[in-house]
Image (spheres, rainbow, N blue to C red):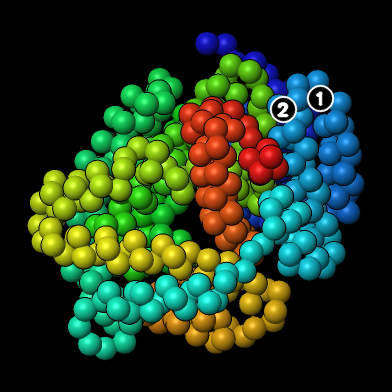
Amino acid sequence: MTLKTPDALAARYIQLAHALDAHSPGFIDGYGGPAELADRTIRPTDVLKTEAEQLHADVQHESDAVRRTFLETQTQAMHTLARMLDSEALPYAEEVRGLYDIEPERANLSELDAALKELDAALPGSGSLEEREERVRTRVTVAPGELLRVAEPILSELRRRTAHQFGLPNGENFSISLVQNKPWSGYNTPLGNLQSHIEINTDLPVALTDLPDLLAHEGYPGHHTEHATKEAVLVREKGWYEHSIQLINAPECVVSEGIAVNALDAMMSREEVQAWLSSELAKVVNINPDAVRDALRVAGLKEKLKGVSGHAAMLLHADGASEKEVLDFFRHYNASTPERAQKSLEFISQPTFRAYIFTYSVGGRLVKDAVKRGAVTFGQLLQGPRTPGELRA
């Protein structure tokens, strides 16, 4: 297949992204386009701000409405980042809004308090909430040396189901490794040419019951599937080279994380996941099926605490709370050990991720609601560009 060359709009988009990444490393999550456009020469931030503003204006002349809408939201985020790099101080809520086209959300503390009481009543034994929960997790912890062995059948089954339900481009593939000293539990890096690399962080013990969701999120039908499918459909078929690059601080991540958050549910019912974990997968690593069922029950209750991280980010970045206050908030409302609370704080403190945290909760809800009401199918989200505004509509 002969690939088209990038048009002027895509070339400018890719070049500006690399120029911004030169000032803000990590802004580009992955790139598989022409090497000659990947110029990271440092240029003045005021120049980049003007370029982003002009590109955003020029996008309005794109004749294809789908492409135009995507590029409008993306270039608006690029302009927001350029403003921040040019020392413009934005209120935290405006930063989130400008980069991701969503509103930051605080949790309802009364609802969190009720969820904690429910969790407290469900956890057996004596001791603090975090101690009792950690005991449940410890019973289903997978040793680091066993993680890749148990990941193999999980990814194989998820890939089989994804190929059957949505299709996969010929030649897609991934590699996987274990890493340490990262603020996240798992990560997928798009490499271009339908390839990606999945990393599992072992800084904290990894529970067997977390692995299907983690690997669906990063692999099938989550990030790897989305990036490979869009490369095949949008870049190779349509010639829209703006999809050969993935940007972290941009609205596309709201949709991408929304897809990934809902990825396992798109493949299997909760009952199927429980049966799979407590039988076949528990045998792979010799874990007691009853321990798996106990951990799943606790994990189900903790889903009601998902707004904690976003609220903590608002405390830290909008309200000026101290790190100690935020750690105490995580420890209380996430029922976290000191180590887990520290890892959560580390994530929302990093410049690249400080506003990113809302892509999970808001993106997950936007995708779930849009699919539920029939505005879009999960398969359509994997193949074509959508913006947070389109999912809201």
Residue 227 visible to the viewer: no
User: Which is nearer the eye, 103 or 17?
Assistant: 103
Q: Which residue is mark 2?
A: 67
The tag on residue 62 is: 1
Residue 320 location, quadrant: bottom right
Residue at left offset 44%, top offset 65%: 304
Residue 2 visible to the viewer: yes
Mark 1 Cα-neighbour bin, 10 Å: few <14, some 14–19, many ≥20: some
Quadrant in which the C terminus appears: top right
Q: Position of residue 83 (x, y in %)?
A: 83, 57
Q: Position of residue 160 (x, y in %)?
A: 29, 29
On screen, residue 64 versus residue 359, left or right, reads right
Residue at left offset 58%, top offset 43%: 255
User: Which is nearer the eye, 372 or 279?
Assistant: 372
Mark 2 Cα-neighbour bin, 10 Å: few <14, some 14–19, many ≥20: some
Contact check, label 2 and label 1, Cβ < 8 Å: yes
Residue at left offset 82%, top offset 68%: 89
Please report whichever mark, 2 or 1, sits nearer to the chain's N-terminal start.
Answer: 1
- Vertical placement of 312 versus 22: above or below? below
What kind of residue is marked 1?
A: Glu
